[in-house]
Amino acid sequence: MRTFFSEDHRLHFPQAELSGGEFVTPYERPSRIEYVLARLKERRLGEIVAPDAVDMEPVRKLLDPGFLAFLETAYDDWKAAGQGGEVIAAGMPTRRQRHDRIPRNIDGKVEYYCHASETAITGGTWRAAQASMACAQSAQREVANGARAAFALCRPPGHHATYDQYGGYCFLNNAAVVADMFRTNGAGRVAILDIDFHSGNGTQDIFYRCGDVMFASIHGDPLDTYPYFAGFADETGEGEGEGTTINVPFGPGTPYGPWAEALDGMIARIKDWGAEALVVSLGVDAYKDDPISFFKLDSPDFLDAGRRIGRMGLPTVFCMEGGYAIEQVGINTVNVLEGFEDA
Ligand code: 6XA
Ligand code: ZN
């Protein structure tokens, strides 16, 4: 399969991430992508091509216009207000207070549109997020035009970005826009399968009340890990979307056995439901040595998971999400793709 990749991901590399009470080099760093690229080439998975220019129309259709306008100018507004460093939220929207008025001041806007302060905005973030989206959109077009599958080597990732908030290293929800583009192209039902270690809370948010996009995610129990406030098993969708959100959380130390069983359960649900296209949020932080996660999947498990997904036989777009055990990120990611092609 073809990979869509843009060098512009490098424009996003914050100086620091707030982690464990310290400022550390962000786990979500440009070198992650180098390992994936190297492995794609080593395994000759297919051509690696630059995406077409981003099309903001499908993005504007799905996401909050105020949020998009904020992201575009946040860094410049921050600087214009005399702030020295990169954009970091000092606070977040509070319980039982007013969220129906957007602050005028840039500090307040940042707090309004952010849900996790480890994620900084730099002078290049908006362009990098657009380039990441461009990869996802080009992969979608490739599959809409008849390819069985395509891989969007997205960076920054997207699955924590909601309708109107960024955080968890994510700014624009690539997988969600891809799913919506399939709908626009005529797919009656689209499924998003999120195998990243973290709950895809942003994707869930965007389609929670939607009956024609199914969202299924296997992840660390939100009682134990980020994002702490979404991804519980009893979140199943609302209104027309009732029954089209599936969450399977697992606790620390979970190995491949139960994880694969959950994957099979989701695959069966997606097939029975009649999905016509599949978007995979492909994070590989379920790996046993991932520095910020606690599952115990090993590299061959990713190959097996890819095979199971491939046997679904659906037109599929893979969007890169997390994975921070740098040297294994390439192997594990490409294992999923090779397993898929093998199926
Ligand atoms: C740091 C945790 C961010 C998790 C990002 C991730 N607060 N999401 O890998 O999939
Ligand atoms: Zn993750």
Image: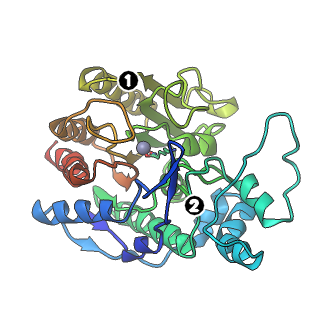
Q: Position of residue 332 (x, y in %)?
A: 22, 47
Q: Secondary structure at mark 1?
A: loop
Determine whether, in the image, residue 63 is placed left or right of residue 123. Answer: right
Cα separation between marks 1 and 2: 28 Å
Seen at 29% across and 61% down, the residue is 147
Determine whether, in the image, residue 66 is placed left or right of residue 265. Answer: right
Determine whether, in the image, residue 39 is placed left or right of residue 141. Answer: left
Q: Position of residue 158 (x, y in %)?
A: 50, 54
Seen at 58% across and 45% down, the residue is 202
Seen at 39% across and 37% down, the residue is 197
Q: Which amino acid type is shown beneath numbered disc 1?
A: Pro
Q: Is residue 1 visible?
A: no
**Residue position for label 1:** 252
Q: Position of residue 250 (x, y in %)?
A: 41, 23
Q: Is residue 301 visible?
A: yes
Residue that lies at the very extreme toward the front in this rendered image? 22
Q: Name which quarter of the figure residue 343 lies in.
A: top left
- Return the residue nearer the eye: 48 or 167: 167
**Residue position for label 2:** 120
Q: Position of residue 296 (x, y in %)?
A: 27, 29
Q: Which amino acid type is shown beneath numbered disc 2?
A: Ala
- Return the residue nearer the eye: 133 or 93: 93
Point out the tag, 1 or 2, that comes first from the N-terminus. Answer: 2
| Residues packed near mark 1 inside 10 Å, few (<14), some (14 to 19) or many (20 plus) | few
